[in-house]
Image (cartoon, helix red, strand yellow):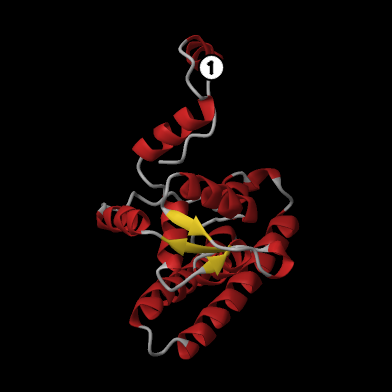
Amino acid sequence: MTFHCGMSLITMIDMTQWNVNPDRAKDREMDERPLNATAASLLGFLHEGSKTGWDLVVTAQERIGKFWSITTSQVYRELAAMERAGLIEAGERGARERKPYTLTDEGRRAFAEWIEREPGQENIRYPLLLTVAFGAHLPPERLAAMLDSHRAAHESQLAEYERDAAVHGSNRFALATLDFGIVYERAVLDWFDLVEDRLGQ
């Protein structure tokens, strides 16, 4: 589900033998692969109008960063790949040498196909759970301190989501996404109460 950026030595040898341009071959291979979720998210933001790479970094961090991991390097890597694939077009460089990107008709089509696909299953990766799973190897007071620290972070995150919900009161799609965050944080805080009872912290 990601754009393919690597090539095997055998592939390189075959391409040299048949006089195939490796870069163009990578572009063709990328064109044939399904759009990955990170690239699709960038296309989704570009439906709102032209944005520079930095605009997209900030937008992604603000809008989906809490539930979808995306880095600055990923954004620029995907933009370069999508430009080669004809999904976006780059404009003239502006301030700070940043160039705006605009969605093409092909990009709209690719996004439409992606958004129609069934989303994949979620994969829980919560480092604190690993620590708790092996908590018998920690002094009780150290584990208690970790739990207190993480509880405080989740209380702060819940408060932030609730503030955001008040700001986005007219955007039902933003609210639907924030609802998940609010319910999730409340559930995690309930879990902390259960952990305290279970472990006698």
- What is the total number of numbered labels drawn onto the structure image? 1
> Which x, y percent locates residue 25?
45, 28
Quarter of the image that includes the N terminus: top left
Q: Is residue 59 above or below residue 117?
A: below
Residue plotted at (57% across, 54% down): 75
Q: Residue furthest toward the top?
A: 17
From the viewer's side, name the closer residue of 97 and 61. 97
At label 1, counting other C-alpha atoms closer than 10 Å, the crowd grade (few under 14, some 14-19, many 20 or more) is: few
Quarter of the image that includes the C terminus: bottom right
> Which x, y percent locates residue 10?
51, 12
Tell me where residue 112 sits by quadrant: bottom left
Q: Is residue 166 left or right of residue 137?
A: left
Give the amino acid type for the residue marked by disc 1 in the picture: Met
Q: Is residue 74 left or right of residue 140?
A: left
Tell me where residue 128 sits by quadrant: bottom right
Tell me where residue 47 sits by quadrant: bottom left
> Which x, y percent locates residue 120?
33, 49
From the viewer's side, name the closer residue of 76 and 18. 18
From the viewer's side, name the closer residue of 26 and 185. 26
Residue plotted at (59% across, 61% down): 53
Residue hosting label 1: 12
Q: Is residue 89 left or right of residue 92?
A: left
From the viewer's side, name the closer residue of 82 and 75. 82
| Label 1 secondary element | helix
> Which x, y percent locates residue 175?
39, 80
